[in-house]
Structure formats: C-alpha cells, structure tokens
Amino acid sequence: MGFRKDFLWGGAIAACQAEGAYDVDGKSLTFPDIIKHISPEERKTFSQAIVTEETIKQGKEGPVSDYPKRWGIDFYHTYKEDIKLFAEMGFKVFRFSISLARIFPTLDEKDPNEKALLYYDDVINECLKYHIEPLVTIAHFDPPILIWEKYGGWSNRHMIDVFVKYATCLFRRYKDKVKYWVTFNEINMMTKAPFKTVAMIAGEGKEYEDKRWTAVHNQFVASAKSVFEAKKINPNFVIGCMIADITTYPYSSDPDDVLANFKKDHMLNLAFLDVMVKGYYPYYFKNYLKVHGIDVKMQAEDADVIAKGVVDFVGASYYMSIVTADDPNGKAITGGNMTGGLRNEKIKTVTDWGWQIDPVGLRIAVNELYDRYEKPIFILENGIGAIEELENGTVHDTYRIEYLKSHLKELKKAADDGCDIIGYTWWGPIDLVSSGTSEMSKRYGFIYVDQDDDGNGTKKRYPKDSFYWYKELIATNGENL
Ligand code: BGP
C-alpha cells in the first residue's frame, strides 16, 4: 500500500522563529520576541513557565541583540530564495504561520494591516508559483503581549472575537489560494508553556488554574467558530487542529502503572483532540476539572458551537515518547519537547537535547489517533535538532537522514495498517531559531543557515546531505524506504 498518491510531503516553520523583522510594517511585540537565548548551562534549570511581568519589562527595555526571535532567519525578506529551495526538494506542501501581531497589531483594529497582508500574499503566491500547497497555521506560539496587557490573556472571552475576526479575514483573503488550515499550533501545550499559547504569564493557585483552563476553553470556542465561518466562505477548505503528541507508555506491566499511563495520555494528549474532533468534552476531562476544583467559565451556547465547529483532520507533531509510572519518585527522567517525562530504558538513543528517539512511537501515535477519530491524520511536525558546522559548503547530517528514514518507515507501516495519513511536514526544513530555548545552534534543517546564536554570520543558505535524501524520497513517494 504505502503512502497515498496525493500524499503531501513538505516542511513546517513558524512566523516567530523564522521571519524576524519583529518591528517592521507595523508589527507589535509578541511573547517570543521577549524570550532570551537560553544557554546549555541555563537549560538545566529553565522552565517554560518562566515568563513574568519582569520578563516583559526587561524585554521591552533590553537590547534587540538579546532576543534571537526578533531577527529569526530573516525569512520576512528571504522567503523567495527559501521557497525556491523547498521547491527544488519537490515540496508538495509548505506549512507556515501568519502572525496576528502583524495583521491586527493592537488586536482591536477594525481593518487589518494591509502591508502585512501584502507580505503574506507574496509568500502564498510564491508557493503557488511552484505548485506547493500553502498550509497556514493561524496561531503558532506568538501571541501579542497586548493580549496579556489589555485582556489578561485568553481567559478573557473578548479573545474569541479577536481570533474569529482575524481568522475570517484570512479565510476571505485566501479563499481561492489556501486550502489547508490549522487553527492553533499544539493547543495542549497550554499545560507547559501558557505564555506561548494562551498569553498568560507564570502563576499558581485556584484563580490561575481557573483562568488557564478557561483560556483554552475559549480557544476551543474560537477554533470551532472559525471552522464554522470558514466553511461559509469556502466549503472546500480543509481545516485541522493540532496537538504535540507525546506518546507515553506504561513504566511497567504493573496495573497501577498501566492505569496511570492511561490517565496521563488523556490529559496530556487526547483531551484537547476529543473536544476539537469529537465536538464535546469527554467524561474524563469534565471529571479532571471537577476533581481539581477548576471552574471553567463556559457560556450556554458554547457546547453547541464546539459541536458544530469540529475539524476535518487531526494534526499532530511527534518528536519523542516518554513512560509514565504510578509512582515516579526516584525514576530517571528524560528531556523533551517542552515537557520531559520518565526515561524509557528500552530506548537507547536520544538527541543532543536529550529527547528520546522512538520511531515506533510514531506508528503507535498515528494508529491511536486514527482508531479514536477515524479522520485523516496529518503529521505536522517531526524532526531532530542537532549541533552542526558547515564543512566545505555543506553538512554531512547522516543522523538526520537516519532519523527521517526510521520515522518514515514507521509512518509507512501506519499507512499499511490502514490509517489514512494525508501528509507529513518536517520541522523545520531550514535551520531556524528554536522555540523552547531561542537557540540558532539547535539546527533542524535540510538547509544550513550561516548564522550563530547571536545573529552573526552571512545568513547564506547551504543544502545539507539530507536535502538530497528528502528530495529523492519525495520524488519516489517513499517507495524505496
Ligand atoms: C514544537 C513547536 C515548534 C518547534 C518544535 C521544536 O513544539 O511547535 O515551534 O520549535 O517544537 O522545538 P524546539 O524549537 O524548542 O526545539
């Protein structure tokens, strides 16, 4: 069987990690704009929940040179050259995000910022020129700081209106150009890094928890309303949701570990998809809120909106897996994509950042999601960050080819298992600033960008060995895996 004939092969990036141009053409300041570069030493104690009022204050006053996402890889100006390289690899799809801070910089403008829209028109036209499907993520980890400052984060229902206005503006503008959309990137990461998702700074206690869960509820409503509006504009739009899928296994066959794992999978991964794909809060989600005394401010019409605005496909990123034990005390831990977990002794290889490399976990994840929802699955991110240096104009990244090959073999097996998988977008096809630690030296690309953590370098682009491997893979639709 293998991959569908129309399988969407490509790559994914995000505005806040690639575009740079943080204050160009009217853009307002976002949370990623105020996250400093985290050194390997600081990484050991760094928490994703670290943003405070002080971080914001420092960010506004501090020198631009402290904040790598402000310059990214200058994609705002290099998109033509970069998309040309993606086309050379044979991309069928290119996933990128649009920045709310560019389109409605103060959130409440009646009309969108035309200059910013013209930029995105160009990016989309450039894709179409090479017959690459643009896949737009409407919100990818870059909430404007004003969401916090004006409204106290997404817990304010006003954000539903802001988002629907913004999404609808994009749907109208790109009605005939963009078919594939994702409303929120990794919506479940509100549990780990609320500043990136629901625009809330660090906090604790009941009031904070009530707000955090109300905030994600408001995102469920905003997504559903947007899907509903989108279909009125173009019924052929294909719209998805997305989680960071952290596949988790029981620590042992002890029934208590199995049960703990079952529950962990629910609240780490599945709860968010259940609401957006099935269209209602499942029993265990409602129970979790009740048991933890969390009051989510819902309105009477929300259930109906969520039921009507379900998505067309299930999107997930997949980087790694963890294990879960009933009693985690004293057990070895592993690093990870925003959230680590317990170490799996069966997994021998980890990335330079300690993320456990587990290709079979991808097959398991896809089967689990397809089994649960019976809707097309789109792997929206998968990749390996590594420290690399340019050698005679290239990088011999055999480990990246190995990572890619082993994951795609498992994805193909998932297709052979009967799962309907519509696409795969590698994170990130070109080196870019890392989300978690603002490092440039954590490189994911098939294309090397000559720039260091401080923004020094020629910014020239160089294809790595993996560039040619992926090109061949796409040309043969993965048949030779
Ligand atoms: C995902 C995000 C991406 C991306 C990736 C890798 O969670 O959606 O934006 O960056 O993780 O993470 P990092 O950049 O921290 O290595």
Image (cartoon, grey):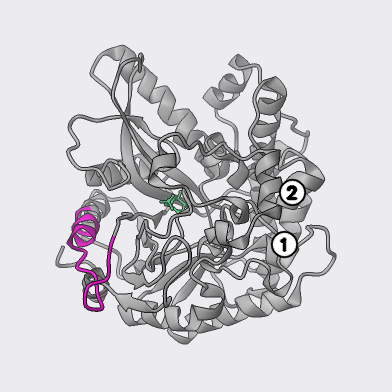
Q: Nearer the viewer, mark 2 or mark 1?
A: 1
Q: What residue is drawn where x is 28% and y is 30%? A: 343
Under mark 1, the amino acid is Ser
Report x, y in % for residue 309: 63, 49
Q: What residue is drawn where x is 40% and y is 36%? A: 44
Picture quadrant where residue 259 is located: top left
Label 2 belongs to which residue? Answer: 147
Check residue 400 for magenta coloring. yes
Label 1 belongs to which residue? Answer: 28
Image quarter in which the N terminus is found: bottom left
Give the total number of marks visible in the rendering: 2
Q: Is residue 186 above or below residue 124?
A: above
Q: Which mark is residue 455?
A: none
**Is label 1's Cβ within 8 Å of ligand 1?**
no
Q: What residue is drawn where x is 39% and y is 41%? A: 41
Check residue 106 for magenta coloring. no
Q: Residues within 10 Å of mark 2 (few under 14, many from 20)?
A: many
Q: Residues within 10 Å of mark 1 (few under 14, many from 20)?
A: many
Q: Tell me the magenta residue range.
A: 388-406
**Residue in the foreground of this view, choosing between 50 and 66:** 66
Secondary structure category for the residue under label 2: helix
Q: Is residue 458 above or below residue 342?
A: below
Under mark 2, the amino acid is Ile
Report x, y in % for residue 139: 60, 56
Report the residue that reaches farthest toward the right: 110
Report the residue that reaches farthest toward the bottom: 129
Picture quadrant where residue 250 is located: top left
Report x, y in % for residue 32: 59, 53
